[in-house]
Image (cartoon, helix red, strand yellow):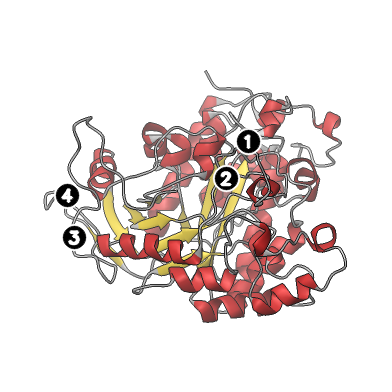
Amino acid sequence: MDRPSAADLDADDLGFRHTPETDQSFENALAKARDGVRLDVDDATELLTTGTDTAGIDRERMEAVLTAADHRRREVVGDAVTFVANLNNNVTTACNTGCLFCNFKDTASNFERDSDVSHPGFTKTPAESREIVRDAVAMGVYEVCSVSGLHPAFALDADHHEILRSYDHPAREVNYKPPDRYETDPGTYVEQIDAMSVDGVHVHSMTPEEAYHARRGTDWSYREVYDRLADAGLDSAPGTAAEILVDEVRDVICPGKIDTDGWLDAMEAAVEAGLDVTATIMYGHVDNERHRALHLERVRDLQDRTGGITEFVPLSFVHERTPLYEQGVVTGGASDAEDKLLIAVSRLFLDNVENVQTSWVKYGDEKALETLACGANDFMGTILSEEITKRAGGDYGEFRSFDDYVELITSVGRRPVERSTDYRQRREIDPDDGPHGPRLGPRADGTPLVADADATGEESSATADD
């Protein structure tokens, strides 16, 4: 049975101005979607709710939306399902931002030298990051994705440290404490990017929130920050930290984060600095379908202005060990129907973004495969190590081999295709020519990323150890 829709929450209790109500009809919105007419926010709201004229999800209408999205996917990208050989290397869990949807963070003061608080968090030095990435590249991985907590000792570079130290009360004024206060010095953002930029690997890092942290206390622009990071080896920027790009929602779930305009400004600056970017949505908490539609509009407008978004990534809220759930603000996450409709409407609404990703980490294999018939065409990557979803309560694993991908994708009649981070390189995989491994990277020669199953029947993990 599907869980209650996020729209079933009483928006009046949260003071939301935006509610899932329109003057449009579901039938008109669906006709526009089928005809390839650019949708507006009212259209998207109708499709996400399967009609605001009725309560709950109408199954027949939902299937019509999913079918329309699947047809659009076939027209835009064909039957290929892409994936990438990548590694997650999150540098630190130290963070004081206080987002209520997150259980990845650990209070930064716990990492200080004089702290006696036991905690499960970690901070990696640049040298440790380099070793982790170098080992992964030797295995054939060619993308490292790095998203980290906002450690108070993290600064863009030495100049940034000097500016932050000049404040009378840096901890209070600009969330800064010098590295010598901590057991482990995370280095600077420039040092971490430089450390991970080894052997031709593609470095995908620095969210808008991290870029804000890398310029706090200064008059630097986002463009200056991304220029310096690009010089250090940054290749593309993940559009995470987007959550819902509607400030009345952000004020509830992440009041300490940058606002919607800040996120958009940072993404635009990253593209101006010559970087590809992605865009995400994290839904299924206190948001409603109108918020999701407004979010899609802001992503589409950004793409109209920049053309730099390579993929859109829907992220279903994993609630089990998050403050939102523990404090009783929410009772669960998005329903299966909401997940499928969000992917479908993303495909139909984002007429200028070619690739829509699904997530086996968020959904599990069975549902992720089902979403490939709802408009999605990309299946994430090998990951090798995943901390963020796992800490929030996700339990679908941390690694996916190329053989796993080939088996899963072919099981639903689609074509497995290895891709580069930017989608500019692609290699169709022959399912009969196994075992399978990456070939697109500088050290990739087709060798499987992991050894044979060990005695417990589980695949041995990669060398990246969080």
Judge depth for marks 3 and 1 and give the one in front. 3
Q: Nearer the viewer, mark 1 or mark 2?
A: 1
Type of amino acid under label 1: Gly
Amino acid type at circle 4 is: Pro
Element type where label 2 sits in the image: helix
Q: Residue furthest left?
A: 433
Label 2 environment density (alpha carbons within 10 Å; few <14, some 14–19, many ≥20):
few
Q: Which mark is residue 31?
A: 2
For label 1, the residue is: 284
Residue tagged by mark 4? 431
Q: Secondary structure at mark 3?
A: loop
Disc with the residue nearer the chain's start (3 vs 1): 1
Mark nearer the viewer, 4 or 2: 4
Q: Earlier in the sequence, mark 4 or mark 2?
A: 2
Per the model, the C-alpha gap separating discs 2 and 3 is: 45 Å
* Above/below status of 247 relative to 228: above
Residue hosting label 3:
446
Helix, strand or loop at label 4? It is loop
Label 1: element kind: loop
Q: Is residue 292 above or below residue 393?
A: below
> Is there a contact, CB below 8 Å, between mark 4 and mark 1?
no
**Residue at the spot 86% in from the left edge and 63% down from the top edge:** 169
